[in-house]
Amino acid sequence: MRKLSVLATMAVSTVAACTVAAQELPKSHIYDFRESAAYHDLDELTRKRLEKVVDDLDLIKHSLNAYMKDHSDSPPKKLEDLVPRYLKRLPVDPFSAKDTSIPKHLKHFERSLNGRGYLYCHKPSGHSIKSYHPLEFHPKPGAWDIRSIGLRKFPLRYQVSNPGLIRTRGYWGRLQLDVF
């Protein structure tokens, strides 16, 4: 009986010690671009433009997801197809101008709003963002990628990789990309 009492006391002490230790550990840190050095190096106007892009990309992302839900998981062929049912109007990319060119590595992207909108690339169901070739495994919903022309080296999502103002849904080859 005494051994059982000692063991019970030790177990309670161990649990209490673990609980205190867990409370003292720092909470896991999720990367926030607003805390990055790159964000603090931006001037006030560029920060305001960046915040507008983040809001616009979220709005377009939700509209694209709603469109796909209503169209058998197929994305629209162009962003203009979202208006007026899913969006009142397409937002203007605050970093673009009519004469802003699309970088060569984004040659499959199209610009909305006659060159003033966001870049958009879509793939039908069963295709990946990486290529126009069908996936080699069970077909998945269509894929899309939207991005701003501005701040191509800005670490919006990760501190060191995948720079740029981007939202993606679908597959990159065999790697599933989440919607950010």
Image (spheres, rainbow, N blue to C red):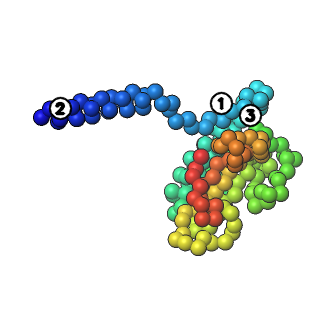
Query: Decide: marks 1, 3 in contact (CB < 8 A)?
Result: no
- Label 2 and label 1: CA atoms lie apart by 51 Å
- Badge 1 density bin: few <14, some 14–19, many ≥20, Cα 10 Å: few
Element at label 1: helix
- Rendering quarter of residue 81: bottom right
Q: Amino acid at mark 2?
A: Ser
Query: Is 61 rendered above or below residue 10?
Result: below
Element at label 3: helix
Residue at position x 61%, y 37% from top? Answer: 31
Residue at position x 66%, y 35% from top? Answer: 33
- Badge 3 density bin: few <14, some 14–19, many ≥20, Cα 10 Å: some
Q: Which mark is residue 35?
A: 1
Report whether 16 appears left or right of 51.
Answer: left
Nearer to us of marks 2 and 1 is 2
Residue at label 3?
38
Say which of 180 and 92 sits in front. 180
- Residue 176 lies, in percent from the top left, at 57, 59
- Badge 2 density bin: few <14, some 14–19, many ≥20, Cα 10 Å: few
Q: How many marks?
A: 3
Say which of 155 and 149 sits in front. 155
Query: Is 99 rendered above or below residue 127?
Result: above
- Residue 112 lies, in percent from the top left, at 74, 51
- Label 1 and label 3: CA atoms lie apart by 9 Å
Q: Which mark is residue 5?
A: 2
